[in-house]
Image: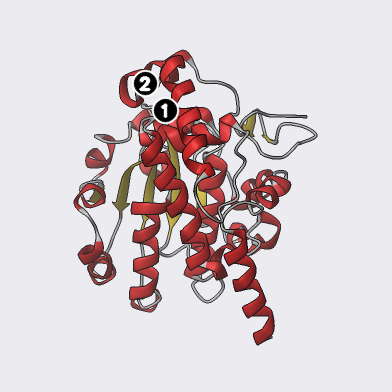
Amino acid sequence: MRVPTMLSDIEELPSVQLGDYVLRFELEDLTPFGKEVAKDELRETPEIRAAAIEELRTLLKDVEDLVVPLDNDDWMIRFLRPCKFYAKSACELIQRYYQFKVKHFDMYNELMPSKEANIFKQNILAVFPNRDQLGRRVLLLELGKTWKHKEVTLDEVFKGCVLFLEAAMLEPETQVHGAVVIFDMDGLTLQQAWQFTPPFAKRIVDWLQDAVPLRIKGIHIINQPKIFNMVFALFKPILREKLRNRIIFHGTDRESLYKHISKECLPAAYGGTVDAPRVQGEQWYELLLKCDNEYKEINNYGYIKQLEEQRNKKNKKK
């Protein structure tokens, strides 16, 4: 079965039944609301889209050593949308996206759901089954009392986030509306705070600012204890203004959170009214596992020669 936004063929659309609710990736074309937002915010019209795809294809042909699916229009669109259909910006984003994978080879080498079961079993990373009031995906990270830092590392958390965002990039609706992230830091301890290091902070900030082909519309920090200030101090000096302005601290003030994510879009745990069941980490794992071949295909692109060199170096050290 061929789904336009995916690089691999799949036997059936990935979905998981949760009681009366079906959890699935939304791989259909844009809704009328999505089309309206795409036109108003991203300049997307059939004419602009067609011209931008051709221009981007031409630009990519001239990028040395970069292997990408040049004949796949939908793949191009996932990079053009966050760049408002400016082909030159999209070409630069694609290069940064793949350069980041070379630079952080250890994180990305053969990255697939089937090899990262632990992060999902820990149940500290989840995407809400529903979108927010603006059509955005909501990613939740619980890095306080729920996080057993001796059992799951921050590197594994990072890999889990990458796997989720790669999946989000497949959804046309998410390409247009973007995503918001909630960090629930309730119960963060000093021992956990020490897990955050300057290199980790730099990798996360570089990733979010330069290498994520998705519109990250807001990062919401909730339930943070005072000790979180020590963690944020690692990130603050390297944040550029655009991202810094999108990081909002709410503490336990739910009304502050509701100004950004509607109460009707939040689960009861955060004072919301959504009655959909909480999606457990293992249920997300089951869903992502059905896309394992897609991640395998994603790994076939990029600066392949440089990745091979990194792989050979790693094998020699063994």
Give the residue number, with chain letter if any, for mark 1.
135
Q: Quadrant of the C terminus?
A: bottom right
Tell me: residue 66, above or below residue 312: above
Determine whether the residue tagged by mark 1 lies in a helix, strand or loop: loop
Q: Position of residue 138 (x, y in %)?
A: 43, 40
Tell me: residue 165, above or below residue 277: below
Identify the residue shown where x is 42% and y is 32%: 81
73 or 179, nearer to the observer: 73
Q: Position of residue 317 (x, y in %)?
A: 65, 86
Quarter-of-image position of residue 26: top right
Nearest to viewer (mark 2 / mark 1): 2
Please state which amino acid type lies under the numbered disc 2.
Val
Tag shown at residue 37: 2
User: Is residue 16 rendered to the left or right of residue 77?
Assistant: right
Quick one: label 2, few (<14), some, or many (20+) residues within 10 Å? Answer: some
Tag shown at residue 223: none
